[in-house]
Amino acid sequence: MFTFPSLAPEIRFDAKNSGAGGEFGDLPEWNLDDLYPTADGPEITRDLGWLKGECAAFATDYENKLADLDAAGMLTCIQRYERIQSIAGRIMSFAGLRYYQNTIDPDRAKFMADMQGAITDMSTPLVFFSLEMNRLEDAQLDGLLGANPALARYRPVLDRMRAMKPHQLSDELEKFLHDQSVVGATAWNRLFDETTAAMTFAVDGEDLNLESTLNLLTDPDRAVREKGARAVAKGFADDLPLFARITNTLAKEKEIEDRWRHLPTPQAGRHLANHVEPEVVEALRNAVVAAYPRLSHRYYALKAKWLGLEKLQVWDRNAPLPQSDNRIVDWATARKTVLEAYGAFDPEMAHIATPFFDKGWIDAATKPGKAPGAFAHPTVTDVHPYVMLNYLGKPRDVMTLAHELGHGVHQVLAAAQGELLSSTPLTLAETASVFGEMLTFRKLLDEALDKGTRKTLLAGKVEDMINTVVRQIAFYDFECKLHAARAEGELTPDQINDLWMSIQAESLGPVFEFMDGYEVFWAYIPHFIHSPFYVYAYAFGDGLVNALYAVYQDGTPDFQAKYFDMLKAGGAKHHKELLAPFGLDASDPKFWDKGLSMIESMIDELEAMES
């Protein structure tokens, strides 16, 4: 089926109003001119016209004819298809990034919806491509690929496409689903985004947006954290019927399509898209759940002791430690910290990251209407990625910068693969981001001058890894329960709340109490809406990077060169091929224990500091 690059679903979420200056220093804003200078200029009009004509011409030239092509003809066909992907991706990247800069601007919302609708209509004639490609016999396709090395490089794309062959519907139904998508999942996603972006939360007489309210949950003052948590709970409780409706509708839509496609489980489509075997994900999930007592339960018991509390409330989960340095980290310091960490690993890594700061590739300030969170969006391979942050000067924001720049570096390196091969499965897409975080953390840890600073850094990293591994696997289990329950009938808001709470104590541990209202916190997590079952990719990436970093620490020869080769591969290789040069294999259940043992060793060190 025709696809074009979408905004990366890693949304922890421009207007051209100024967000620069203030206590953080001069914060950069996006310059989207490298995509298009304006939304109504001749450049985008030209590309829309070309796209409309080329989609029709492509269908005329190739529909019902793929089986008759020789190797040279098939190569030309795929290259034309790839060019269509690139132009469509450029248009939608521009429309999407403008929208996320200010999701409550009706003109931006209309422009994105209009572009989505136009490109969906234009690309309907292309639906035949994957359907006919999947009808080719294996022997015929193998012969074509064997006859032309330039064509053979597209094998990974074709293999992933053909993995859906058993789940392919009729041509007519596939075209219907393609046309209908703009008023289906896409529309419900947009409703979720616009609703959360427009929400305000009353705290001490001030109306805050979601990002600023969630930020209160890391405040040193426990009373402030509680106010933030209760404000989030009230805000989402007030709108809970809407969020339950969105969730019910999307889960049912997915169940219907999965049933028609004969997908065996709700998770199967995600596994196929990620090019990862279900048993690998199950091994990861089981290893993490088995480690809950050794990781999150043990760490949070320590944290309760540090905070002088017998029990932790949900607003204590991300509380800074009492001895934490609560100074604001200005933007210049954040930039210097991350670039130096990258450069110490390899100067080329810092060289690739530097233009993000200097050329308007980062939008950092928190502004009214701006989508909450952070992401790195690759756009298309003949432009460059863009990074969105909501920078509030906290140490965690520095780590978020390191994380998103890691994505950016990965996307720059993979771009040489071209539009169809550059995109990395979600399970591997977190590799460079988490590795970038680890490099930055290790730099700060090596520079720690006293035990207190080291303890704060270690605790912060353990919390980040628990949030990335334990929390995300708990989210995955919640989604598994949610979709299984929805298959039996519509879920009331209370039923969804109960499913959410059923996994919280297990993952966080007995030291936690849960305030009234915490049961609605599932409603603000965008991954459940945008990309069902995406969340295990975070745990996959963290476990992979922990194992990878251990190999680096062991002094493996030519590690940097092997690492860059892995990033440059983009989506051209399976995870087994990518990890083999490092002596790692994610299909080995013991692999995940290696990654989890790094977190455990940090908790061991923190416990030893108490003796």
Image: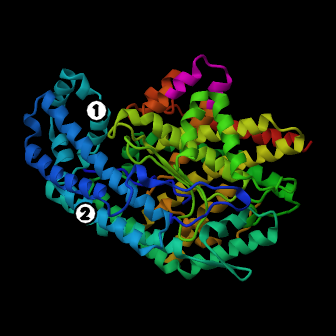
Q: As displayed, is residue 215 above or below residue 106?
A: above
From the viewer's side, name the closer residue of 25 and 296. Answer: 25
Q: Is residue 592 left or right of residue 161?
A: right
Question: Magenta stretch containing residue 2, yes or no?
Answer: no
From the viewer's side, name the closer residue of 549 and 564. Answer: 564
Instruction: Estimate the x, y position of residue 188 in percent, counting from the top left.
Output: 39, 70
Q: Earlier in the sequence, mark 2 or mark 1?
A: 2
Identify the residue position indicated by label 2 in the image: 118
Identify the residue position indicated by label 1 in the image: 154
Q: As displayed, is residue 327 above or below residue 529?
A: above
Instruction: Estimate the x, y position of residue 487 in percent, counting from the top left.
Output: 38, 66
**What quarter of the picture does the C terminus occupy?**
top right
Question: Magenta stretch containing residue 555, yes or no?
Answer: yes
Q: As displayed, is residue 146 above or below residue 343?
A: above
Range drawn in magenta: 549-564
Q: Is residue 222 left or right of residue 437?
A: right
The answer to which image quadrant residue 236 occupies is bottom right
Magenta part, dominant SS: helix
Q: Residue at left 47%, top 78%?
A: 242
From the viewer's side, name the closer residue of 57 and 26. Answer: 26
The answer to which image quadrant residue 122 occupies is bottom left
- SS for callout 2: helix
Instruction: Estimate the x, y position of residue 379 in percent, counting from the top left.
Output: 41, 48
Q: CA distance from mark 2 to mark 1?
A: 28 Å
Q: Residue at left 10%, top 46%?
A: 63
Q: Residue at left 61%, top 32%?
A: 547
